[in-house]
Amino acid sequence: MQQDKPLSGIKVVEHAGGVAGAWAGRLLAAMGAEVIMVEPPELCLLRQRAPLFDNGSSALFAYVAADKRSVVLDLATDAGRDAFASLLGDAAILIDDTPLAGREALGLDQAAIAARHPNLVHLSVLPFGATGPKADWKGEEINLIHAGGEGYLLPNGLSATLFPDRPPLKIAGHFAEMQGGVAAALAGLAALWSGEGQFVDVSVQDANLAVGAFALQRFGDGSIEHRLTRSFRYGGVIECRNGFFELLTLEERQWRGLVELMGHPEWAADDAFNDAVERSARGEMINREIHAWARAHDVEEIVARAQKLGVPMARYNTPQQVLSGAHETARGIFQTQEWPDVGAFSVQTAPFRFGADAPQLSAAAPQAGADQALVSSAAATRRATA
């Protein structure tokens, strides 16, 4: 049965060659919007971005372009710009990540879009935003993860303990750019909700500064976090007999659940541990006890018991365990798709749901120009309503 989605009937035109803009479009598509990628004659740059399948096609593109449609237009020509304007005629949102310096030549500058399409939400997604001293700066994932502050704090926790001499590392994949895409999707929806056409300026750096808000807040008390000192007073990543889990206890009930999970050890009976501040002060001692206890148990056993007791704990999964885990399977997080010359592969459907059932992707990423007929259809509609 076709699932009802909140953006069904909403048309989005995506002109994006970067991950942030493409991920924003992917999220809107997962919510039911019709997302039309407008690719240049040389095609979307993401079609060549790693990681790659064995046949050389991009697994990244297959992921971020799922459930979208593709048309190829040359916006450097009058015909291409006219066709693009036709597509925007009944669109609600335009996603664009063209660098500022190149927008006017393509008819994508703020003034031109506002004049021709006053009711459109023009969603600009750039590494450092469309205004300010860094508006013209370029930025890739490695720049953005550090510009947002998170790169300075990596690796931390167990990674920093096991490999203290490692240089700062970025999170695997496109974490920073996808955070920018999430911010862009939410900002675009907020503008759409307002019912007014407007220009929305999204900075990927700003989105990542929000991720590291706790580190920024600590500047107020004179503290500067560092990857070797950033850790929980107790908990964090713990080694078991056959793997690792992560533990976090922020609330009193969670602490009591942990004590019960550990079998009410004698040391935890000290009245001093009834005070959260005192527990933090004795965090190093508590962690020694947790580590010693955990090494005698299997991950699955501890995590299952912890979750029944309301203790925030989860296994550190291998990639294969993520795909086949009981929780992930029950939630329907992954869906099998077919990609030409690749075969079947698993892809996350969406990081949200709107009902009892997980949202389903209706189509794999499109071949270039697979929906070119949309251009002539839009042009015909434009002529009929002119």
Image (cartoon, rainbow, N blue to C red):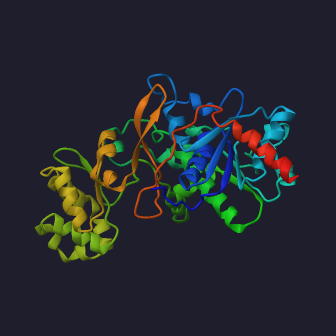
Q: Is residue 73 left or right of residue 36?
A: right
Most distant residue in the top direction: 55
Q: Nearer the viewer, residue 45 or 31?
A: 31
Q: Residue at x 15, y 56 (%)?
A: 293
Q: Nearer the viewer, residue 270 or 127?
A: 127
In this view, 227 is above or below 47: below
How many labels, in total? 0
| Residue 235 can be seen in this image | no
Q: Is residue 268 left or right of residue 362?
A: left
* x then y, percent, for residue 248: 32, 61
Q: Residue at x 12, y 66 (%)?
A: 263
* x then y, percent, for residue 26: 57, 47
Q: Quadrant of the N terminus?
A: bottom left
* x then y, percent, for residue 353: 46, 60
In this view, 226 is above or below 308: above
Q: Which of the 4 image quadrants contains residue 337?
A: top left
| Residue 263 can be seen in this image | yes
Q: Nearer the viewer, residue 130 or 252?
A: 130
Q: Residue at x 41, y 53 (%)?
A: 230
* x then y, percent, for residue 270: 17, 74
